[in-house]
């Protein structure tokens, strides 16, 4: 199952100490650079000065390909409550391991090569084939980061109108 699901609310650690110690793999809440009135949640994959590459859906950090392990396929609800078959993979950066979602019937992810500017982060959504993240042309200044996602405190499945109480208080990984 993905680490975060649509309809979840989380507790965010906003202490200044936490924001100064962001690592690859952390899930952060930030002001979206293209509309700072909106908060987004994404995973840190690149730190200031890092080189990031994406080729054929594979992620490279400072020239090293991240390790990917296939975990299987599941059906999840997408926009409009349409069920879609997705692949769940575990991606490991060396600093962290986490689940990502791949959607086989969507076009390949955005390929490219980027250098993360000083004082900024390169962020990617865990739904790799359907995410408006840093691959679309923005990095996130550290001062736009509001904090690190810590725990899920509420999870609502709007397609089934039910609580997902088994996800309450799970640590965000």
Image (cartoon, rainbow, N blue to C red):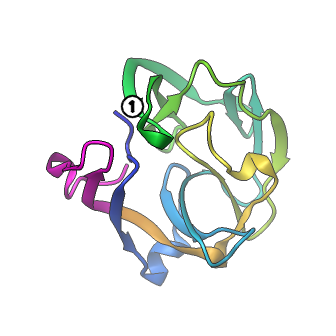
Which residue appears at 68% of the width and 26% of the height? 57
Position of residue 34 in the picture relative to residue 46 (left or right): right
Q: Give the magenta range.
A: 151-173
Q: Hey, which residue is sitting farthest bottom in the picture?
A: 16
Which residue appears at 74% of the width and 22% of the height? 56
Q: Position of residue 27 (x, y in %)?
A: 48, 56
Q: Position of residue 61 (x, y in %)?
A: 69, 39
Instruction: Report the label total.
Output: 1
Which residue appears at 52% of the width and 38% of the height? 94
Mark 1: secondary structure? strand
Position of residue 134 in the picture relative to residue 146 (left or right): right
91 w.r.t. 6: above or below:
above
The N terminus lies in quadrant: top left
In-front residue for pair 29/20 = 29
Q: Label 1, on which residue?
A: 76
Q: Quadrant of residue 74?
A: top left
Q: Position of residue 100 (x, y in %)?
A: 49, 34
Q: Quadrant of residue 111?
A: top right
Which residue appears at 34% of the width and 64% of the height? 10
136 w.r.t. 30: above or below:
above
Magenta residue check for 87: no
Position of residue 121 in the picture relative to residue 88 (left or right): right
In-front residue for pair 43/10 = 10
Q: Quadrant of residue 75?
A: top left
In-front residue for pair 85/141 = 85
50 w.r.t. 149: above or below:
above
Q: Position of residue 60 (x, y in %)?
A: 70, 33
Near mark 1 (Cα within 10 A), the count class, few <14, some 14-19 or many ≥20, is some
């Amino acid at each position: 199952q993905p680490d975060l699901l649509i309809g979840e609310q989380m507790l965010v650690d906003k202490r200044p100490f936490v924001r100064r110690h962001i690592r690859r793999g952390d899930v952060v809440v930030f002001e979206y650079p293209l509309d700072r009135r909106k908060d987004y949640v994404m995973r840190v994959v690149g730190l200031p000065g890092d080189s990031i590459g994406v080729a054929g859906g594979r992620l490279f950090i400072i020239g090293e390909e991240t390790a990917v392990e296939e975990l299987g396929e599941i059906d999840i609800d997408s926009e409009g409550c349409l069920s879609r078959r997705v692949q769940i993979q575990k991606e490991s950066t060396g600093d962290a391991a986490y689940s990502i979602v791949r959607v086989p019937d969507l076009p390949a992810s955005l390929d490219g090569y980027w250098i993360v500017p000083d004082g900024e982060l390169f962020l990617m959504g865990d739904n790799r084939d359907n995410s408006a993240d840093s691959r679309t042309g923005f990095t996130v200044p550290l001062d736009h980061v509001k904090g690190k996602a810590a725990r899920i405190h509420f999870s609502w499945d709007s397609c089934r109108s039910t609580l997902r109480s088994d996800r309450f208080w799970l640590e965000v990984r």
